[in-house]
Amino acid sequence: MNCVCPDYVRTSMQDRELVWEAGLRNMTAAKVRAEYVSLTPLGRIEEPEDVADVAVFLASDLARFMTGEAVCVTGGAWMD
């Protein structure tokens, strides 16, 4: 079994999270989003399609010999 591990995905759920985090940090949601982007080497928030493309790959024959992998779809946000 493989899994897909996304990061900051542009969804309505993330929009609610941005507002919540902005309230906690006394800043605007736009500034929180800008921070997320600054933490992502690819320079943008990922789209649902970015995650879906990886899921389609894992479900295809191209990944037929992959097993036990956690595929990070983060735009590099957690590369150390």
Image: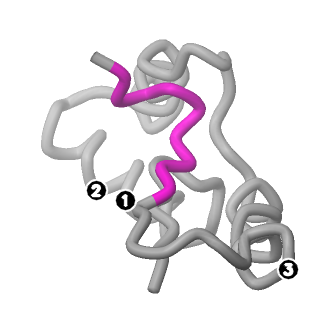
- Work out how far the residue at label 1 is from the one at label 2, CA to CA, in angstroms: 5 Å
Task: Tell me the residue that label 2 is attached to.
Answer: 20
- Work out how far the residue at label 2 is from the one at label 3, CA to CA, in angstroms: 41 Å
Work out whether residue 22 or residue 79 is closer to the camera in this orientation and state it. 79
- CB atoms at circles 1 and 3 under 8 Å apart? no
Mark 2, mark 3: which one is toward the viewer?
3
Magenta stretch? 71-79
Apparent side of residue 61 relative to residue 32 in the rendered image (left or right): right
The type of colouring in the image is: one colour
Work out whether residue 50 or residue 17 is closer to the camera in this orientation and state it. 50
- Work out how far the residue at label 1 is from the one at label 3, CA to CA, in angstroms: 36 Å
Q: Position of residue 57 (x, y in %)?
A: 80, 69
Q: Secondary structure at mark 2?
A: helix
Q: Position of residue 33 (x, y in %)?
A: 50, 32
Q: Which mark is residue 17?
A: 1
- CB atoms at circles 1 and 2 under 8 Å apart? yes
Disc 1 marks a residue whose amino acid type is Glu
